């Protein structure tokens, strides 16, 4: 089955809380190693584009502070996932169109205080998925792509819009 990359972060510039300014090497790896990154959410995209730099097909851009994948250009090579120091890029089946755009495993109020788009583990997705394809594990929604039909119920019910149709 063909796979494409997916950035599991929806921490756009207007949603995430900054904790400090960074002046130095413009690299995700450097930011993470030197001081953990500029944002309150310790699970989110660092926004320097290390993933875009290694993409051989120009399938990644930075939009509103977060890496975004152009699925038409992505060949699923996994180079971006390998270079992401936060591990927020995953390969998902190309035929699936629903994804959890968050990796934050903190409890709802804490997650929400660092990013207003964070998954809060409310379980609305889990309780209402007709295929039992969504489970909340460690305060984070996880989609079982073998069961997901892309019906969109979880997308409609997600109060923070951390589950999206992509």
Image (tube, grey):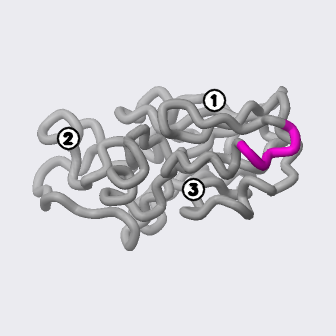
Residue drawn at 42 percent across, 43 percent down:
104
Quadrant of the rendering where the C terminus is positioned = bottom right
Label 3 neighbour load within 10 Å: few <14, some 14-19, many 20+: many
Q: Secondary structure under badge 3?
A: loop
Reply above or below: 30 against 13: above
Instruction: Say left or right for 63 vs 42.
Output: right
Residue 160 drawn above or below residue 135: below
Residue labelled with disc 1: 77
Coordinates of residue 139 in the picture (x, y in percent) = 49, 38
Q: Is residue 26 above or below residue 143?
A: below
- Measured in 3D between alpha carbons, the distance from the residue under mark 1 to the one under mark 2, in whole angstroms, is 27 Å
Viewer-proximal residue, 18 or 109?
109
Residue 162 is inside the magenta segment: no
Q: Is residue 4 visible?
A: yes
Circle nearer the N terminus (2, 3): 2
Looking at the rendered image, the disc whose residue lies closer to the viewer, 1 or 2, is 2
Q: Is residue 58 visible?
A: no
Between the C-alphas of marks 1 and 3, the distance is 25 Å
Mark closer to the chain start, 1 or 2: 2
Foreground mark, 1 or 3, reads: 3
Kindly identify which residue carries mark 3: 162
Which numbered mark, 2 or 3, is in the foreground of this view?
3
- On the image, which quarter does residue 155 sit in? bottom right
Q: Which residues are magenta?
A: 127-131
């Amino acid at each position: 089955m063909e796979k494409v990359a997916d950035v599991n972060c929806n921490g756009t510039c207007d949603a995430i809380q900054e904790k400090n300014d960074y002046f130095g090497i413009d690299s995700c790896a450097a930011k993470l190693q030197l001081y953990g990154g500029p944002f309150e959410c310790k699970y989110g995209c660092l926004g320097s584009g290390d993933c875009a730099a290694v993409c051989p097909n120009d399938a990644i851009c930075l939009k509103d502070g977060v890496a975004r994948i152009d699925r038409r250009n992505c060949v699923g090579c996994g180079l971006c996932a390998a270079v992401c120091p936060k591990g927020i890029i995953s390969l998902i089946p190309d035929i699936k169109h629903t994804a959890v755009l968050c990796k934050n495993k903190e409890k709802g109020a804490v997650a929400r205080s660092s990013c207003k788009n964070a998954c809060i583990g409310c379980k609305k997705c889990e309780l209402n998925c007709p295929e039992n394809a969504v489970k909340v594990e460690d305060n984070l929604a996880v989609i079982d792509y073998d069961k997901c039909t892309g019906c969109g119920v979880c997308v409609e019910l997600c109060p923070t819009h951390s589950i999206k149709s992509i």
